[in-house]
Amino acid sequence: MTIAKSPPTLPLLENGDRLDRAEFERRYTATPDVKKAELIEGIVYVASPLRFTRHARPHGDLTGWLWTYKTAVGAIELGIEPTVRLDNDNEPQPDVVLFRVDGNAKIDDDGYITGVPELVVEISASTVSYDLHDKKRVYQRNGVKEYIIWRTFDQEIDWFVLENSKYVEMKPDAEGIIRSVEFAGLWLNVKALLAADMQQVLKTLNEGITSQV
C-alpha cells in the first residue's frame, strides 16, 4: 500500500528573511496573522503592533490632509498601506501613497500597485528607522518623486524631492509652509501639523488649492 505524503508546509514569513518578491508574496499570503510586512532590498520586515499617539493619530492626520487635496483636485488616487511592487527585491507597504491616474503607478490584475507612485508618506519613530535609510534609498532609486517622513518621536517632518535622481530635502519657508513641487497647491503647514492643529493645516491647504485656480 502506498501512503500519500502530505505536501511540504510553506515556511511562515519571518523578520529578517532574505527572499525575492515572488517568494515573499507566497509566504505573506500563507501567513494571514501578519497584517503588514515589507520586502526592502531583499530583506523582510514584519511590522510590530502600532501605538496610537506615535503612529495611528499622525497617520490619520496626514491621510486627512491628502484626502482633502485629492477630492479638491481630482484625477488622483490615494491609498493607505497598499502593497507596491517596485522591483524584484522591493515590495514596500507605505503608510500612504498619492499618485496620478495617468501616471506611472497602475493597479494590476491582482489589485496591487505596480510602478512608482509620485508621492510616498511614511510615519516613523526617529532617524534610526529604516524609513530614513534603506527605504529612502529604494524610493530614490525607483524614482518616487516626493517622499515625506513624519518622525513622531523627534517631532520633525522630512520632505524630500527628487532632483537629478537624488533626494533633496525641502525646508519650510518663512511662513512655515512646505509646498509640493510635484502636486500644485499641496501645501503643508508644518508647525500646525506638529501641534495637531488640523483646522490650520486644512486652512493652509485650501489656500494652496485656491492659488492654482
Image: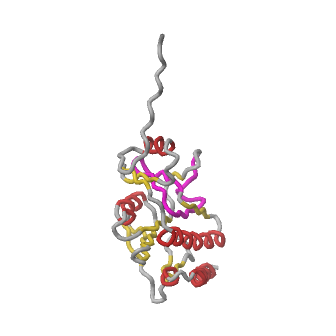
Report the coloring of the rendering: secondary structure
- Horizontal side of residue 94 vs 154, given as left or right: right
Q: Nearer the viewer, residue 5 or 36?
A: 5
Residue found farthest to the top: 1
In the depicted structure, whether residue 126 falls above or below residue 6: below
In the depicted structure, whether residue 13 falls above or below residue 6: below
**Residue at the image point whose x is 43% and y is 45% from the top:** 13
**Residue at the image point whose x is 43% and y is 60% from the top:** 143
**Residue at the image point whose x is 57% and y is 61% from the top:** 79
Query: Quick check: is 107 in the magenta stretch?
Result: yes
In the depicted structure, whether residue 32 falls above or below residue 52: above
Q: Is residue 72 visible?
A: yes
- Horizontal side of residue 202 vs 171, given as left or right: right
Q: Is residue 211 visible?
A: no
> What secondary structure do most residues of the magenta stretch adopt?
loop
Q: Nearer the viewer, residue 62 or 163?
A: 62
Magenta-highlighted residues: 82-108
- Horizontal side of residue 32 vs 23, given as left or right: right
- Horizontal side of residue 73 vs 167, given as left or right: right
- Residue 174 in percent (x, y) is at 45, 89
Query: Quick check: is 10 in the magenta stretch?
Result: no
Q: Nearer the viewer, residue 9 or 73?
A: 9
- Residue 161 in percent (x, y) is at 43, 70
- Residue 96 in percent (x, y) is at 53, 64
Place residue 76 in its image quadrant: bottom right
How many numbered marks, from 0 up? 0
In the depicted structure, whether residue 185 falls above or below residue 103: below
- Classify the position of the C terminus by image quarter: bottom right
- Residue 73 in percent (x, y) is at 64, 71
